[in-house]
Structures are given as structure tokens and as C-alpha cells.
Image (tube, coloured by chain):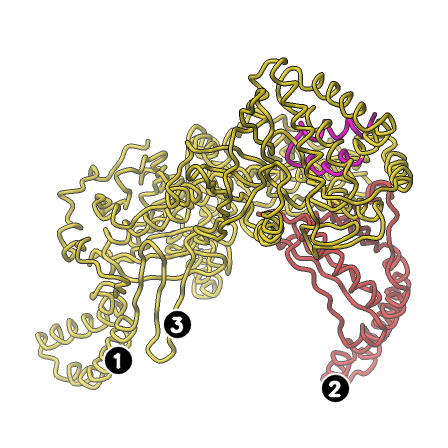
Chain colours: A yellow, B red
């Protein structure tokens, strides 16, 4: 069935390669060379005019040969007009071509057009959603192709380029659109695509639709058979009464509709091939105009599998997809425009293959379908037995129709909104429809005629499923973002002469790489403004401490900046090794003295001077921000995290409001002289060196928005309780032991305050539910004590 | 019956009573005005003015029937802001309940035509990527409409997720 009717792909012997100009020489490429489209462009754009000219000229010769002077004389006045039209068209075509320039290189994609009103379109590579190649017949004859670039809701055309150049640029642009670095020079050597299918060498055809199948399926499709039958009936009946002309008013629109149907469904879908390229799915199709279209899988919003009645006997299906932004205007399945057809006709195996690519892991048969209740026959007497719906954890399916059986599949993550509807008759029967809305396109998922109770459950549970799917999608995107960031990060690392193997440590906000003995590169993960501001506030704070010796190495920021879209700072490298890493391998005899030095270091931090007196936040929005009392400061610190975690906490802890009130009541009783508080004294932020009597903590890094001028006990408590989070076996036992040491030093009443601050930190880090389940579990433990 | 369209464990917020007054006015005034033109044309064309009278009578009947339904139609409207989505219900004969997740809202519009302005009313429309959504709340007081718009925009940003 899928046997290819096309010649095998040839690249070197391909005539397209020989008809174009000399290939660009990489060494001769100067800076920012703008290019014009192919010089034949004006001719191709003036194609219709040339055709008209050729026909007129041809007719003149014919009539002259037939010695009919009157006709020839009649033509003579048409010819000058034709000539003027052609010249005008040629001039406009030439002017448009002459003033069109484009740049596609490693830095940018820019297209400049317009003779009088200049227009320069610059499209960021990441914004490109799809790059299609379209070859109208005229362009095909000259070996040219149009490049259509979709970004956001706008579509930019670049016409015409030589076919091989267009396909090279397409590959390059798609590579860049996927966030990967590539140089355009690497692609210059790539082989050109086949003339007939425009499939690249690297493309792996998944499904090919043979001409026979396409034509047979078209002849058997309901959309063809209905107008065809009506036409025949009209012609036969009117012919029987000898009044055919009377029916013309109805016949002509019907015929026009049928021709346009043939054009869209047969000519436009000729040689249809769905292929897998390294950049996702690609569709090539068309008899006269060849269209090569990439299918942006992440923009697919729904899938529709339909089967006209007669196809059932041949086991054929048709697959359409909703692609975001494709159905703008009413150019539905226009021959040269991007279409929503994924497969015009395919067997069940091919359908499953294609759907498997579009919705990975989706299994059409695995979803249990529920029929509508029998009483639906009073409303949907014509197709009540075909109504079905079902869902699994990723998609919702609805089915209806027997004349054309339609299955609509909507991934939960793409659900826009949900509607329950009920008409008067349905109300008598206690039935209702549930519609799941997707963006504009062929998919229209409605579960018809459900029992009221079922309808309500389906609608409400669909909202929950959609919400869960959106959350999962966000997470997946965040991970992908990190991957892209990693990629850009690598280039930055290389610029500082370091690399991934020099990773010293990584936390939620940043990763740290060694540059040399004295410096580290801190690469921030987030793309937000926050790290920039934090660094700008930390730099003077660190500087103000440069002169004070508290027997601890403190961090410094030497330099900060942004490169490749990533914010970075160059920091002082603290000597020694990371305390957290060391703890995991040290035995108890070594650990205990080191932990005591950790407690010492924590207490020494209190001696650092604060830039402002009183209770204050030193880093963050509006910092330094002063507060009258400790409670006010700590409440302000909790406000941010609680905003996002409040609902979650209410779900997870029964009496969380009571815990919250108790914390505030306790804190109100605390009276203390404020001192410097690091806010996040934990082993990953501490550095350990070999002292005269064994390893001791000699450095404390990573002051942050947690840093405040407040109760010094906050850090002492933090040092003990964050130790529990360390990933080694005896961490909890060590924490309890260190707590006993601290109690011995500071007196028994601190037991109460450590307990209070456990609850404080439990709230403070509770927004971890969104990104760190282990830390969140720890928070819940603190709050439930 | 009512349960099908009730929001889970929330109370519907209703429309402003002024909206009912506005609909009562339009239901009484619009049909006679609309049907006057055909009535006059028929009367002039045929010369039989009693047909024009019949059309007029029909207009009056339509106006009265519509007037009678305004109260029920007004009562059928309701909306509620839930944690993650907005519910809107309306319709007497054909009832519907639409739920729009905040994360899917692309646009929140407040409109107020001349008549609505005269009654001190405004309409809030929510747009998602789907044209089928068609979520619209008419007959809100301008303060409530602005509050709703600001709140929905804020929630939309907080819940925003890519398509």
C-alpha cells in the first residue's frame, strides 16, 4: 500500500543541485553580508502574467497562420495593454526583489523589505515555531522554493530561494529554534533534498500515502459522495423532464464546491508523506505546489480520527490535528498553506504509529470507553448507539457518528475550558452534554448525552485532571529550561576557562565552578532579576566585612555580569573543602570535633557588623528594611513563602493555623539584642580545612536573602536543625548531640527557643513543596512536633 | 436538577438587579420597534392596514412574553471565583455551566455600551485560546466588573501556564 511511486532519493545526481548557482564559499563570507533572494524571483512572481503573454502570443501566431485578418486585427489592440501589464508586473516584481534582503547567520535572522516604506523584521531564533517550504508550480520549474517562517501569530515569507538553499536554511533555523547552538557553515555541506518529495536524506518516512489509495479513499469519502450523489440526482431528474438549465443555479455552486474539494483533498494531498526528521515530524505533499511543513508537536492541541462509512470496509482512517495558531483565518486546508491534516488516509497501524509520535505513550485501545445511557435515543435518535466517552490519566476521548465516525482526543494539559449544557428535552431525560474546549481547529470534543450525575463528575474531574496535567507540564518545561540553560552555561564556563568537571557544588539557585585557586564562577539558574539584585546587595555587604577578622573566611564578589542569557558572579574561592561532602565520609571521631568547630563558626558570625541598626532584612526587596520588633521582622520573612505554600500546608497539617498562632505568640515573648544572622547555616555552606588538631570549619559562604539582623539564636538553632537534612546515616544523631552541646553552652532555656525556631524554619522553607519534597517533608516534621 | 449546575461548595454570585431592569426595558421596547418597519411596509404595500395591526399585536405579545421571562433569565445567571477556576452559569431553557481555569485565561475584557452605561452596568468577557469558551458575565456593576477584571488578571498571571 505504501510502496513509493517516486524515484529513489538521489543527492549528488540530483538535477536540482546542478541548476542552482555556485554554492556559497564559507571563507569568502564577510561580516553581516545581506543577501537577496534568487534573481529569478521576479520572473516566478510574475508567472501568471507570463502565462497570459504566452497564450496571447500563441493565439496570434495561430490566427495569423489561419489568414483571418479580422481576428488578428482585433488582437492588436489587446497586445499593447498586455505588454504594459507585463512590464508593470516585471517592474514591481523586480523592485520587490531588489529591495528584499535577508540575513540568516549565527547571530540573527533578519528580513528587510520595501522600497519606500522600509520594513525590517528580526525574528529571535527561539520564537520560531515552524519553518515550512512551499514550492508553487512556477517556482518548482525553476528549482526555487519559498521559505515560510511562523513566529507567534505572524507568518513571514521569504521568496524565492534555490531549493537546496531553502532546505539548508530550514534545517539550520529549526536547529536554532530548538535552542541548540549551531553554525550555519556546518550545514552548507549537507546534501540537498529530493525534487519530488523534498525529503532530506536524514528524514525517515513513517507513512506514505499511495496515489491509488488517496484517490480511492477520496471517491469513497462521505464529503465527496454526498455532493456527487446530489448532482447526479439533480441532473437525472431535470434531464428526465428536459429542464436541465433550470437546475444550473443549484448545480454550479455544487460543481465549484466539488472542484475545490478535489483540489484540496487530492491535488493538495498528492504524494503525501509523513516523515520523521531529526527536528520532529515533517509532512510533504502536493502535486503542483509542493509543500513541506514541519509539525510542531508541542503545539498540537488535540487529535481527531475520523472514518467515513465506506472506509470502514477498507479499514481506513483520517487524522486531523489542532495546531495552535495554524487555523487563523479560514484557509483551512488550502493547498499551499499549513494544514491541519496529519494523515489524509491511513490504516489503523499507520494511525497508531502517527498518534504515537504526536502523543507519546498514547494507546487508543487502552482507554475504557463508556456509552451514553439508552434514553439518549430520544434526543439523538440518529446516532445514539455511537456516543462514547472515556479518559485515562493523560487524555480524554469522545466518539460519535456512524455516517462519519469521529473520535476526538484531547490531552488534559491542553484543555482550555469545560462546559456542561442541557436543553429542555435533555432536562426531562436527565441528560447533559459536556464539552471540552481546545483552540481553534478541527477537534471538537463533546461527550454527548451523559447522565446528569456522570456529566457533572466528568466535568469537575476533567478540571482536576487538566490542572494536574498543567502542573506536570510546567515541571517538564522547567526541566527542559534547565537543559537549555546548561547548554548556554557550558559556553559561559568555557569562556572562564572552566568546565562541568570543575563543579564544586550546586544548590537551588546556582552552581559553583572552580576557576583557579582563588576564584569560583557562580552560575545562577534563574532567569529572573532576583539574583542580579541579590548580588548587587551582597557585594557592598561583603566589602564592609573585609576588614573584620572573626577567624573565618568570608565570601567576596569580584565581578558580576551576564553572558549568553545567564547571570554569573566571580566569587572568592574559600579554602578547604565543602563540609557537607566531607561529613558523608568522615567517621564519628572526626565528625564530632568538626561539628563543634561548625558551632563555633556559627557563633562567630554574630560578631559581623550590620549596615543598619535594629531588626532588619539586609537582602531582598526594599532592603535594608528595618523593623521595630523581632516578630515583625520574622513575620515579614514568612509572608513570601507562606503565600505560595499556605493552601498546601492547610491540606497537609490539620491544625496549621493553631501552629502559626502559637509561633507568633512565642516569638512575641522573645527579647533579644539583634546581631548578624546568616539565615542558612548548613554544612553545604561551610568550608573545612585541616587545623593543628584535625579538620575545622574555616569558612562560611552563601549569605543570601535569608541574611538578616535579628536574634543570633536563629543561626545556632539553624546549625543544629539543618544538620538533620544532611544525607548521611548518623545525621539525626549528630544533630541531637550537637543540640546537647549548644544547650550546655547557652543554658537550658534555649531548648524552648530551638523548638520555636524549628517551627519558624518549618514555615520559612515550606514553599519547598513545589520543588523539593525531601525538604518539604522536613518542614512538615518541624511543624508537627 | 439544580445540582447539575451548582458549583461545589460555593455560593453563586448573582448579577446586579439593574441588569434585570435593563432587560425588562429592552424586552418591552425592542420588539415593537423592530416590527414597526415591516408592519408599515406591509400596510403601505397592501393597503390592508389590519395586517399591519396584526404584526403590531404580535410584537406586543412577544414583548409581554419576553418581559415575563426576564426575571427567570436574570436569576439563572451566576458566577463564582473558585481557587483555580471561574464558574459561570446561565440559561433558563438551555442551561449551561462553564468552568474556565485561571491558567488558561488570555484576556479579560470589560465592556459597557451606551445603554449599559445608562443603567450603570458593565460586561466582563474572558477569552482563552479556544473560541468555544465564550465566557461572559453581563450586568455587573462597574466596580464589581473592574474588581473582577483585576482579580482575574492577577490570578491568570499567577496560574499562567504555556499552551
In the image, A616 versus A502, the foreground residue is A616
Is A326 positioned to the left or the right of A40 in the image?
Answer: right
Q: Decide: few, some or many residues near mark 3? Use Cα within 10 Å; few <14, some 14-19, many ≥20.
A: few
Label 2 resides on the chain identified as B
Q: In terms of image quadrants, where is residue A33?
A: bottom left
Residue located 25% across and 49% down the image: A185
Q: Secondary structure at mark 1?
A: helix
Residue located 77% across and 79% down the image: B39
Magenta span includes A779: yes
Q: Secondary structure at mark 3?
A: strand
- Work out how far the residue at label 3 is from the one at label 2, CA to CA, in angstroms: 59 Å
Q: Position of residue A614 (x, y in %)?
A: 79, 51
In the image, A503 versus A312, the foreground residue is A503
The residue range painted magenta reads A760-785
Q: Decide: few, some or many residues near mark 2? Use Cα within 10 Å; few <14, some 14-19, many ≥20.
A: few
Q: Can you tell which mark lies on residue A119? A: 3
Q: Can you tell which mark lies on residue B44? A: 2
Q: Position of residue A288 (x, y in %)?
A: 28, 54
- Work out how far the residue at label 3 is from the one at label 1, CA to CA, in angstroms: 23 Å
Number of labelled discs?
A: 3
Q: Are marks 3 and 2 on the same chain?
A: no
Which residue is under mark 1? A88
Magenta span includes A474: no
Q: Nearer the viewer, mark 3 or mark 1?
A: 3
Q: Nearer the viewer, mark 3 or mark 2?
A: 3
In the depicted structure, whether residue B13 falls above or below residue B65 = above
Q: Secondary structure at mark 2?
A: helix
The image quadrant where one finds the C terminus of chain A is top right
Amino acid at each position: 500500500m505504501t510502496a513509493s511511486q517516486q524515484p529513489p532519493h538521489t543527492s549528488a545526481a540530483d538535477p536540482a543541485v546542478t541548476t542552482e548557482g555556485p554554492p556559497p564559499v564559507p571563507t569568502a563570507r564577510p561580516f553581516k553580508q545581506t543577501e537577496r533572494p534568487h534573481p529569478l524571483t521576479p520572473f516566478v512572481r510574475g508567472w501568471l502574467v507570463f502565462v497570459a503573454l504566452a497564450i496571447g502570443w500563441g493565439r496570434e501566431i495561430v490566427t495569423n497562420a489561419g489568414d483571418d485578418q479580422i481576428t488578428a486585427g482585433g488582437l492588436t489592440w489587446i497586445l499593447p495593454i498586455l505588454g504594459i501589464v507585463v512590464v508593470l508586473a516585471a517592474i514591481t516584481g523586480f523592485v520587490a526583489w531588489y529591495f528584499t534582503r535577508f540575513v540568516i547567520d549565527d547571530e540573527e535572522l533578519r528580513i528587510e523589505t520595501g522600497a519606500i516604506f522600509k520594513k525590517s523584521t528580526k525574528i529571535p531564533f527561539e520564537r520560531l515555531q515552524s519553518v515550512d517550504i512551499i514550492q508553487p508550480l512556477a517556482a518548482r520549474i525553476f528549482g526555487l522554493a519559498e521559505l515560510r517562517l511562523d513566529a507567534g501569530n505572524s507568518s513571514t515569507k521569504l521568496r524565492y530561494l534555490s531549493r537546496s538553499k531553502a532546505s539548508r536554511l530550514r534545517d539550520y533555523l529549526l536547529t536554532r529554534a530548538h535552542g541548540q547552538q549551531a553554525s550555519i557553515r556546518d550545514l552548507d555541506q549537507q546534501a540537498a533534498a529530493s525534487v519530488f518529495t523534498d525529503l532530506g536524506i536524514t528524514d525517515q518516512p513513517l507513512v506514505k500515502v499511495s496515489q491509488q489509495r488517496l484517490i480511492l479513499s477520496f471517491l469513497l469519502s462521505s464529503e465527496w459522495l454526498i455532493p456527487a450523489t446530489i448532482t447526479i440526482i439533480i441532473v437525472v431528474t431535470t434531464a428526465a423532464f428536459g429542464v436541465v438549465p433550470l437546475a444550473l443555479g443549484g448545480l454550479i455552486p455544487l460543481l465549484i464546491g466539488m472542484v475545490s474539494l478535489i483540489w484540496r483533498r487530492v491535488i493538495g494531498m498528492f504524494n503525501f508523506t509523513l516523515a520523521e526528521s531529526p527536528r520532529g515530524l515533517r509532512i510533504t505533499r502536493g502535486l503542483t505546489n509542493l509543500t513541506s511543513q514541519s509539525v510542531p508537536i508541542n503545539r498540537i492541541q488535540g487529535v481527531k480520527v475520523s472514518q467515513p462509512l465506506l472506509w470502514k470496509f477498507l479499514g481506513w482512517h483520517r487524522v486531523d490535528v489542532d495546531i495552535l495558531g495554524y487555523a487563523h483565518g479560514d484557509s483551512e486546508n488550502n493547498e499551499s498553506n499549513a494544514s491541519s491534516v496529519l494523515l489524509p488516509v491511513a490504516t489503523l497501524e499507520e494511525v497508531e504509529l502517527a498518534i504515537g509520535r504526536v502523543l507519546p505513550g498514547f494507546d487508543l485501545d487502552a482507554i475504557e470507553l463508556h456509552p451514553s445511557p439508552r434514553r439518549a435515543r430520544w434526543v439523538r435518535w440518529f446516532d445514539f448507539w455511537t456516543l462514547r466517552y472515556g479518559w485515562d490519566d493523560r487524555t480524554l476521548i469522545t466518539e460519535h457518528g456512524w455516517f462519519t465516525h469521529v473520535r476526538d482526543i484531547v490531552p488534559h494539559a491542553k484543555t482550555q475550558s469545560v462546559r456542561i449544557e442541557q436543553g429542555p428535552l435533555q432536562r426531562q431525560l436527565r441528560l447533559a452534554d459536556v464539552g471540552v474546549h481546545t483552540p481553534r481547529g478541527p477537534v471538537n470534543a463533546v461527550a454527548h448525552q451523559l447522565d446528569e450525575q456522570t456529566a457533572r463528575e466528568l466535568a469537575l474531574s476533567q478540571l482536576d485532571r487538566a490542572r494536574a496535567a498543567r502542573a506536570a507540564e510546567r515541571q517538564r518545561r522547567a526541566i527542559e529550561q534547565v537543559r537549555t540553560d546548561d547548554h548556554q552555561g557550558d559556553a559561559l564556563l568555557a569562556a572562564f576557562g572552566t568546565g562541568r568537571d570543575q563543579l564544586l557544588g550546586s544548590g537551588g539557585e546556582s552552581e559553583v565552578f572552580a576557576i583557579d585557586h582563588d576564584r569560583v564562577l557562580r552560575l545562577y539558574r534563574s532567569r529572573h532579576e532576583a539574583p542580579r539584585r541579590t548580588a548587587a546587595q551582597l557585594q557592598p555587604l561583603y566589602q564592609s566585612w573585609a576588614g573584620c577578622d572573626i577567624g573565618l573566611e568570608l565570601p567576596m564578589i569580584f565581578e558580576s555580569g551576564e553572558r549568553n542569557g545567564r547571570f554569573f558572579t566571580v566569587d572568592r574561592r574559600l579554602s578547604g573543602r565543602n563540609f557537607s561532602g566531607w561529613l558523608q565520609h568522615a567517621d564519628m571521631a572526626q565528625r564530632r570535633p568538626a561539628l563543634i568547630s561548625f558551632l563555633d563558626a556559627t557563633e562567630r558570625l554574630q560578631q559581623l557588623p550590620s549596615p543598619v541598626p535594629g531588626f532588619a532584612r539586609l537582602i531582598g526587596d526594599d532592603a535594608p528594611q528595618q523593623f521595630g520588633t523581632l516578630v515583625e521582622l520574622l513575620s515579614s520573612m514568612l509572608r513570601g513563602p507562606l503565600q505560595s505554600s499556605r493552601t498546601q500546608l492547610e491540606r497537609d497539617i490539620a491544625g496549621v493555623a493553631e501552629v502559626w498562632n502559637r509561633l507568633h505568640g512565642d516569638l512575641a515573648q522573645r527579647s533579644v539584642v539583634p546581631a548578624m544572622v546568616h539565615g542558612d547555616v548548613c554544612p553545604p555552606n561551610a568550608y573545612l580545612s585541616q587545623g593543628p588538631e584535625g579538620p575545622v570549619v574555616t569558612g562560611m559562604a552563601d549569605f543570601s536573602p535569608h541574611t538578616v539582623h535579628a536574634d543570633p539564636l536563629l543561626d545556632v538553632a539553624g546549625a543544629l536543625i539543618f544538620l538533620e537534612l544532611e544525607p548521611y546515616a548518623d545525621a539525626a544523631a549528630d544533630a541531637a548531640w550537637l543540640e546537647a552541646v549548644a544547650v550546655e553552652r547557652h543554658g537550658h532555656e534555649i531548648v524552648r527557643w530551638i523548638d520555636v525556631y524549628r517551627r519558624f524554619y518549618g514555615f520559612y522553607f515550606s514553599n519547598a513543596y513545589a520543588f523539593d519534597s525531601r525538604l518539604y517533608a522536613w518542614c512538615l516534621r518541624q511543624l508537627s512536633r | 436538577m439544580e445540582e447539575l449546575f451548582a458549583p461545589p461548595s460555593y455560593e453563586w454570585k448573582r448579577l446586579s438587579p439593574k441588569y434585570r431592569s435593563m432587560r425588562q426595558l429592552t424586552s418591552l421596547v425592542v420588539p415593537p420597534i423592530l416590527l414597526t418597519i415591516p408592519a408599515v411596509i406591509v400596510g403601505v404595500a397592501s393597503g390592508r392596514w389590519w395586517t399591519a395591526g396584526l404584526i403590531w399585536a404580535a410584537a406586543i405579545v412577544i414583548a409581554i412574553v419576553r418581559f415575563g421571562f426576564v426575571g427567570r433569565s436574570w436569576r439563572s445567571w451566576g458566577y463564582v471565583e473558585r481557587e483555580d477556576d471561574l464558574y459561570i452559569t446561565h440559561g433558563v431553557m438551555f442551561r449551561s455551566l462553564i468552568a474556565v481555569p485561571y491558567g488558561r485565561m488570555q484576556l479579560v475584557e470589560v465592556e459597557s455600551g451606551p445603554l449599559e452605561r445608562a443603567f450603570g452596568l458593565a460586561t466582563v468577557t474572558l477569552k482563552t485560546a479556544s473560541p468555544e469558551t465564550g465566557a461572559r458575565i453581563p450586568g455587573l456593576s462597574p466596580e464589581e466588573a473592574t474588581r473582577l477584571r483585576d482579580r482575574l488578571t492577577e490570578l491568570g498571571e499567577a496560574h499562567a501556564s504555556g499552551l
